[in-house]
């Protein structure tokens, strides 16, 4: 009976440790979700700014505002910044290392240097 009592005590300690570990993981996961939401908001806001600047530039130049299909021969300004989803995707690629910010910022520098800073 004593050995059985020792085993039960070990299992209870293990369950407490497991419960504490699970609680800590869930707390960290909650923080991760909030951080990702904040990142999404920042990406969205900057994508709106860059898309608006691109659209205003295209309207000023008298260029057709219809979104074009993805094509290598297309102007990089249109390819990366012509629509809100494309702008968000371009910013996401830049953050995750899929494309260099230098390559994305170069078309924006044609609009104004303030967009690159």
Image (cartoon, helix red, strand yellow):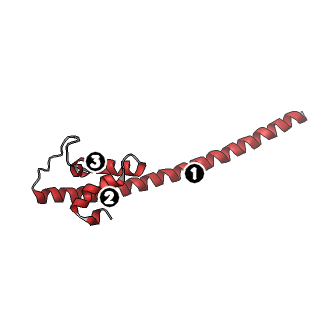
Residue at which label 3 appears: 86
Q: What element does badge 1 sit on?
A: helix
Residue 117 vertical placement versus 78 (above, below): below
Q: Secondary structure at mark 2?
A: helix
- Labels 3 and 1: the sequence-earlier one: 1
Residue at 20 percent of width and 42 percent of height: 73
Q: Is residue 59 shown left or right of residue 84?
A: left
| Residue at position x 11%, y 50% in the image | 64
Mark 2 Cα-neighbour bin, 10 Å: few <14, some 14–19, many ≥20: some
Spot occupied by residue 98 in the image (x, y as percentages of width and height)? 38, 45
Percent across and percent down for residue 52 are 22, 58
Q: To which residue does mark 2 refer?
A: 46
Label located before the other in sequence (1 or 2): 1
- Tell me where residue 55 appears, x and y as whole percent: 18, 56
Horizontally, is 96 left or right of 29 in the view? Answer: left
Q: Pointer 3 and pointer 1: residues touching (CB < 8 Å)?
A: no
Answer above or below: position of 108 versus 24. Answer: below
Q: Position of residue 2 (x, y in %)?
A: 90, 36
Q: Residue at x 79, y 40 (%)?
A: 10
The crowd level at tag 3 (other Cα within 10 Å; few <14, some 14-19, many 20+) is some
Provide the residue designation for mark 1. 27
């Amino acid at each position: 009976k004593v050995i059985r009592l020792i085993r039960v005590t070990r299992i209870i300690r293990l369950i407490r440790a497991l419960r504490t570990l699970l609680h800590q993981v869930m707390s960290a996961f909650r923080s991760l979700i909030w951080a990702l939401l904040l990142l999404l908001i920042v990406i969205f806001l900057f994508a709106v700014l860059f898309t608006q600047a691109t659209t205003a530039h295209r309207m000023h130049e008298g260029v057709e505002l219809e979104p074009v299909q993805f094509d290598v021969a297309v102007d990089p300004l249109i390819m990366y910044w012509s629509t809100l989803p494309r702008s968000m995707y371009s910013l996401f690629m830049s953050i995750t290392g899929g494309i260099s910010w230098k390559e994305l910022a170069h078309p924006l520098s044609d609009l104004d240097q303030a967009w690159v800073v």
